[in-house]
């Protein structure tokens, strides 16, 4: 199978404008199935580090609000990342909901976090494939 993207001869650029945070230390959390799973190792930046537990709870709350407001228009079932800044002590803001291209390796470097996420991801796609195959076969049987 040939990738469509590999056949494109053009780069598609974009511009992202974001406010600059005084504290540029950013926590990044791996998410799947509507649940914040763990802190990733790509949490970096300059500035003062802040409590992981508080930022993680905020990331989950932000994800819940986004799901409530956006419903199925947010890819919350699959694998993605929530990136969080602390703007004032104890006050957080979501920088972005990062796509499937996000780095989701565990900051704790514990294979168990990544292993559980990998297993859940396999099950997630397996379920989607089974459901879609069943729907396709059902549709074809009525054709």
Image: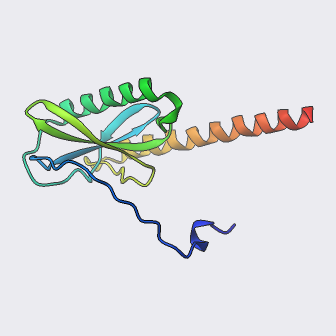
User: In the rendered view of the protein, which quadrant contains the C terminus?
Assistant: top right
Instruction: Specify how the rendered protein is coloured.
Output: rainbow
Residue 83 screen position, x and y as percent: 28, 43
The answer to which of 19 and 86 lies nearer the viewer is 19
Q: Residue at x 25, y 46 (%)?
A: 108
Q: Residue furthest bottom?
A: 9
The answer to which of 110 and 3 lies nearer the viewer is 3
Q: Residue at x 47, y 36 (%)?
A: 74
Q: Please say if 37 is above or below 46.
A: above
The answer to which of 28 and 99 lies nearer the viewer is 99
Residue 1 screen position, x and y as percent: 69, 66
Q: Is residue 140 left or right of residue 69?
A: right
Q: Residue furthest top?
A: 68
Q: Residue at x 56, y 38 (%)?
A: 124
Q: Residue at x 47, y 71 (%)?
A: 11
Which quadrant of the structure image shows residue 139?
top right
Residue 3 screen position, x and y as percent: 62, 66
Which quadrant of the structure image shows residue 136?
top right
Which quadrant of the structure image shows residue 89?
top left
Residue 71 screen position, x and y as percent: 49, 27
Total label count? 0
Q: Is residue 40 left or right of residue 67?
A: left
């Amino acid at each position: 199978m040939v990738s469509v993207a590999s056949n494109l001869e053009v780069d598609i650029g974009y511009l992202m404008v974001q406010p600059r945070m005084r504290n540029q230390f950013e926590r990044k959390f791996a998410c799947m199935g509507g649940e914040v799973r763990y802190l990733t190792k790509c949490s970096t930046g300059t500035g003062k580090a802040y409590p992981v537990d508080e930022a993680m709870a905020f990331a989950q709350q932000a994800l819940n609000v986004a799901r409530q407001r956006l419903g199925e228009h947010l890819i919350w079932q699959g694998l993605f990342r929530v990136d969080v800044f602390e703007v004032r002590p104890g006050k957080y803001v979501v920088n972005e909901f990062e796509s499937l291209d996000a780095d989701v390796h565990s900051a704790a470097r514990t294979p168990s976090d990544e292993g559980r996420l990998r297993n859940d991801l396999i099950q997630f796609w397996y379920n989607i494939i089974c459901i879609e195959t069943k729907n396709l076969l059902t549709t074809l049987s009525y054709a």
